[in-house]
């Protein structure tokens, strides 16, 4: 994770927090509160970590597991006779919250009834603020937003990277990029998916393209086929399913931020599994003297076809502060989803029984009556 600030005035030229490498999100984890941080039927997990001396230290209630009702899962009304079928969506949610100095990061893994797995991050807390720099208009800072009289909040990014050790129906998988593109046709209406296999590591350094609805498919390479399509069983990585789609890191490639946080220069990297390759920016992010992590690992340009592959997905929030973010910021969202794509032989939620929420009440005579 890298958090660069876009102000070229001293001393902010070096202002960038590598929150995982600098602080450690586990060390910064909150002890969660029932009925506030998590709602519903809750199970908490304590976490045992090593302290700065290497001794075991227990963080109480650091992880929460609960279920949420998230609205309609599917619905259809048969127009011929008015028959209605509707099912509610419930999700199993695994969550944790970390406070890193001024910011809160709220992490949610959501396991859905349709077989999808969503990872959502919510960002809250307090903006990192400062006085305007020498030479700046105190009422109109050039590299930030005035959020209160005399208080400048700099434009910045929060760049995350998730390590996804995939095993779709087996250990050997192949990754492909899927773009939706137009094609020539007599009536000009044809378009559809074009799939490109990412064969080598250096071929798999990819950027997201919203204009092509780009996604990345992870397919079984051990002969497991979908009984309907006859194609390999697969899941797909769909970027930016929570919050706005965002750019890669915006600092110049020559900056120390871009060199140490090089993982954020692309939305996707793919490598064959190596138990020593655990952190996308390398083992020692703040103290390293040379570029480490993903750019170093892919120099060998290893094979990716029919391998035990690891996807490294970089994403984040580019934050232009608003007055409404001060003095405490309402949550911003970012995240991605892993969706089954030919993994099942039909809708896996089709057998969910109807359920009427008896706690719902009709407001009589009506909310708008006098």
Image (tube, rainbow, N blue to C red):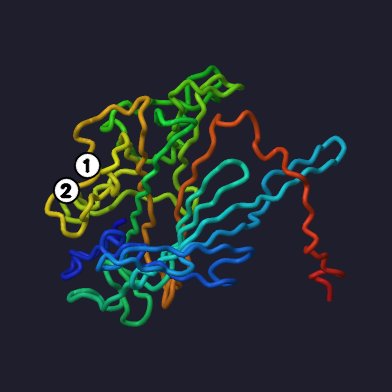
Q: Is residue 152 above or below residue 2?
A: below
Instruction: Decide: few, some or many residues near mark 1? Use Cα within 10 Å; few <14, some 14-19, many ≥20.
Output: some
Real-space Cα separation, disc 2 to disc 1, in angstroms? 8 Å
Instruction: Decide: few, some or many residues near mark 2? Use Cα within 10 Å; few <14, some 14-19, many ≥20.
Output: some
Could one spot residue 34 in this view of the protein? Answer: yes
Quarter of the image with the N terminus in it: bottom left
Q: Which residue is the site of mark 1?
A: 295
- Label 1, secondary structure: give it: helix
Q: Nearer the viewer, residue 185 or 166?
A: 166
Residue 329 place in picture, x, y as percent: 44, 71
Tell me how many marks there are. 2
Residue 273 place in picture, x, y as percent: 32, 36
Verify CB contact (< 8 Å) between mark 2 and mark 1: yes
* Residue 130 located left or right of residue 324: left
Q: Nearer the viewer, residue 149 or 219?
A: 219
Quadrant of res 286: bottom left
């Amino acid at each position: 994770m890298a958090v660069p600030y876009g102000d070229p005035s001293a001393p902010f030229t070096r202002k960038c927090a590598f929150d995982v490498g600098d602080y450690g999100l586990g060390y910064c984890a909150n002890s969660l509160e029932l009925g506030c941080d998590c709602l519903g039927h809750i199970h908490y997990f304590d976490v045992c970590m090593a302290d700065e001396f290497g001794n075991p230290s227990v963080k109480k209630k650091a992880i929460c597991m609960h279920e949420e009702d998230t609205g309609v899962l599917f619905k259809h009304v048969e127009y011929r006779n008015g028959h209605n079928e509707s099912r509610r969506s419930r999700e199993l949610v695994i969550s944790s919250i970390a406070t890193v100095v001024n910011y809160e990061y709220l992490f949610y893994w959501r396991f859905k009834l349709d077989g999808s797995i969503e990872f959502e991050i919510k960002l809250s807390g307090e903006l990192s603020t400062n006085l305007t720099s020498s030479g700046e208009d105190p009422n109109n800072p050039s590299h930030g937003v005035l959020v209160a009289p005399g208080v400048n909040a700099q434009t910045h990014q929060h760049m995350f990277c998730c390590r996804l050790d995939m095993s779709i129906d087996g250990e050997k998988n192949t990754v492909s990029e899927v773009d939706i593109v137009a094609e020539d046709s007599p009536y000009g209406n044809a378009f559809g998916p074009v799939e490109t296999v990412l064969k080598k590591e250096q071929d798999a350094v990819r950027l997201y393209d919203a204009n092509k609805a780009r996604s990345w498919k992870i397919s079984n390479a051990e002969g497991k086929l979908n009984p309907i399509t006859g194609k390999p069983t697969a899941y797909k990585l769909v970027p930016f399913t929570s919050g706005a789609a965002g750019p890669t890191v915006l600092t110049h490639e020559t900056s120390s931020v871009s060199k140490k946080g090089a993982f954020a220069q692309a939305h996707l990297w793919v490598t064959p599994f190596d138990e020593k390759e655990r952190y996308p920016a390398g083992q020692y992010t703040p103290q390293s003297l040379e570029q480490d992590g993903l750019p170093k690992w892919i120099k060998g340009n290893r094979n990716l076809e029919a391998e035990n592959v690891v996807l490294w997905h970089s994403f984040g929030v580019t934050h232009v502060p608003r007055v409404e973010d001060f003095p405490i910021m309402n949550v911003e969202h970012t995240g991605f989803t892993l969706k089954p794509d030919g993994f099942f032989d039909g809708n896996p939620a089709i057998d969910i029984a109807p359920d009427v929420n008896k706690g719902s009440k009709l407001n009589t005579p009506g909310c708008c009556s006098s």
